[in-house]
Image (cartoon, grey):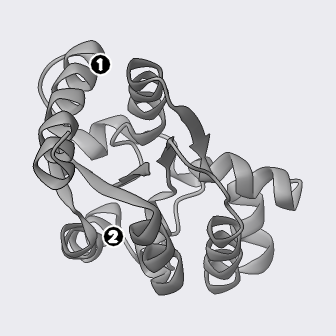
Amino acid sequence: MNIVLIGMPGCGKSTVGVLLAKALGMAFVDTDVVLQAREGRKLQQMIDAMGIDAFLKREEEAILSLSCDRTVIATGGSVVYGRDAMKSLHERGTVVYIRLPFAEIEQRLQNLATRGVTLREGQTLRDLYDERVPLYEAEADIVFEGSGGDIEQTVAALTARLAGVCEARHGV
């Protein structure tokens, strides 16, 4: 069984994911890194060269190609647009939405032009946030409040929350 982290760019999926995997004795995969390795270029270069729709298709293909178990999977923020990708991730794990207020996301994302965020022409970060939050909430098995506290506190709180969910679901 895997733990799948979803949420806005800048919410801490990769940072929390690495430490969560270590705390739980699991492997770690960042799907953005998988996609970059498959394509041989950075996310923003892909978006610029192929457009958002083609990028989202490639992102979904990369996720569908994953073959892992007992792994913490940090996904790209746009994963929730891929119906087949989300179905596959749900079948193989528990999906955790790391929720942060917009102001915190905005503060963390200073490099939108190079970060690989799928902003359509004329779309603001606020527009993207408002569009995606309902998608993240709909896909989440667990909604985890990621703000407040340092990274160690966040990982400890998420670990405890996951232990409670596993116990409730599997009687472990």
Q: Position of residue 143 (x, y in %)?
A: 16, 54
42 to the left or right of 39: left
Check the image and report above or below for 162 versus 157.
below
Q: Which label is found at residue 151?
A: 1
Q: On the image, numbered disc 2 is attached to which residue?
A: 128
Q: Nearer the viewer, mark 2 or mark 1?
A: 1
Report the front residue among 165 and 128: 165
Residue depicted at x 76% and y 65%: 46
Picture quadrant where residue 164 is located: top left
Residue depicted at x 24% and y 64%: 140
122 to the left or right of 168: right
Distance (Cα) linking label 2 and label 1: 25 Å
Picture quadrant where residue 94 is located: bottom left
Which badge, 2 or 1, comes first in the chain's sequence? 2
Check the image and report above or below for 43 versus 70.
below
Q: Position of residue 171 (x, y in %)?
A: 15, 46
Mark 1 crowd level (few <14, some 14–19, many ≥20, 10 Å Cα) = some
Residue depicted at x 57% and y 33%: 27
Q: Which label is found at residue 19?
A: none
Residue depicted at x 20% and y 75%: 138
Under tag 2, what secondary structure?
A: helix
Under tag 1, what secondary structure?
A: helix
Q: Is residue 120 visible?
A: yes
